[in-house]
Amino acid sequence: MEAMWSFWQLLLAVPFLMLGLYCCYIKVVHVKYDYIPGAPRASFFFGHLPIFWRTLENKELMHDLFLKWAEKYGPVIRFNAFHRVSLLILSPEGVKEYLMSPQYSKDPRIYGRLYSIFGVRFLGNGLATDLDYNHWHKQRRIMDPAFSRNYLIGLMEIFNDQAEDLMKVLNEKADGEIEVDMMNLLRRLTLDIIAKVAFGLELNTLHSDQTPFPHAFTMVMKGLSKERNPFFQYLPRNRKEIQEVRESLRLLRHTGKECISQRRKAIQNEEPVPLDILTQILKSAGRQLFTGRSLITMHLSL
């Protein structure tokens, strides 16, 4: 009986010992990284997570909180959550350093979520998510000509025309009574500009509510947010929303596939093609081995 009691005491002591060691490890992490500026932690274990949860619960914008902290603590801010430390980099020089240098590898747990959403490929191993620096660098070299200063200056007329379209839409609604969702209009403006300068597509989403693309992008972003909950896709009540996210992803990837296929065919037939970003990418990619799936992923990443 005494041996049994000793066994149970030992069994109960192990979890407390593990908890104590974990607390010590968290403390070591705090001491190691607390020289980096950041808001005071709301909890020893949860770090800054309770602050984020409160912000979401109050339906406030997380980016307003980040801006407030940046104004107070500077362009490099530390976040704590359990034993993990994350940095928010707001300085252009810092962002460039982290994105361009091979010594700062992407976190697979973060970028892996962007590979696919609910089992449907999203950004895959595209420019924004590729964990292999050498493969990322090849993609970057393909993209570079399409983002040169001289090339982008040549697209300014399109930017200006789209901005004029937005002003016309705002003038039509400026009667002092209609509430205008500026975020929605700016999303549509951005989508129209990118579609035209990058792929030669006339989506005209500012003037038409019938086009499915704004809704598709909204659903993809919702899916990306909801997928952070590992149990979301297994709840029966969420099946309809999950299916809608999957269909939205398939629509975007199918559109990209059609754009690439038609443009490739036109280039091969020596037909006149618009000198947009897609043409530049296809010409650069033609000199390297890239699969159709990789090109579609580049298309969607843009």
Image: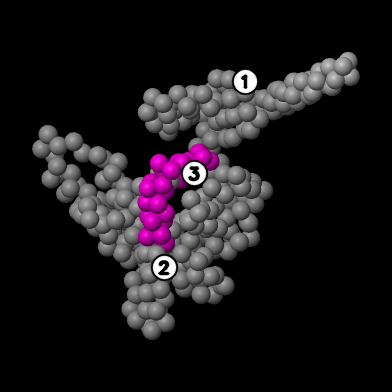
From the viewer's perspective, is the residue at label 1 or at label 3 nearer? 3
- Which residue reaches farthest left? 175
Residue at numbered disc 2: 257
Question: Mark 1 touching mark 2, by CB under 8 A?
Answer: no
Query: Does residue 228 belong to the magenta stretch?
Result: yes
With 22 as the anchor, is 146 left or right in this view?
A: left
Where's residue 212, x and y in %? 29, 56
Q: Secondary structure at mark 3?
A: helix
Query: Which comes sooner in the sequence, label 1 or label 2?
Result: 1
Where's residue 68, x and y in %? 44, 26
Residue at numbered disc 3: 234
Where's residue 284, x and y in %? 50, 71
Q: Secondary structure at mark 1?
A: loop
Distance between the Cα atoms at labels 2 and 3? 30 Å
- In the image shown, does 299 or 284 lie closer to the viewer? 299
Q: What colouring method underlies this structural image?
A: one colour
**Amino acid type at mark 3:** Tyr
Query: Which comes sooner in the sequence, label 1 or label 3?
Result: 1
Residue at numbered disc 1: 44
Which stretch did the figure color magenta? 224-253
From the viewer's perspective, is the residue at label 2 or at label 3 nearer? 3
- Which residue reaches farthest right? 3
Which residue is at 52% across, 33% downward? 75
Position of residue 188 relative to residue 11, above or below, is below
Residue 207 visible somewhere in the drawing: yes
Position of residue 144 relative to residue 54, above or below, is below
Quarter of the figure with the N terminus: top right
**Amino acid type at mark 2:** Lys
Which residue is at 27% across, 60% downward? 203
Q: Residues within 10 Å of mark 2 (few under 14, many from 20)?
A: some
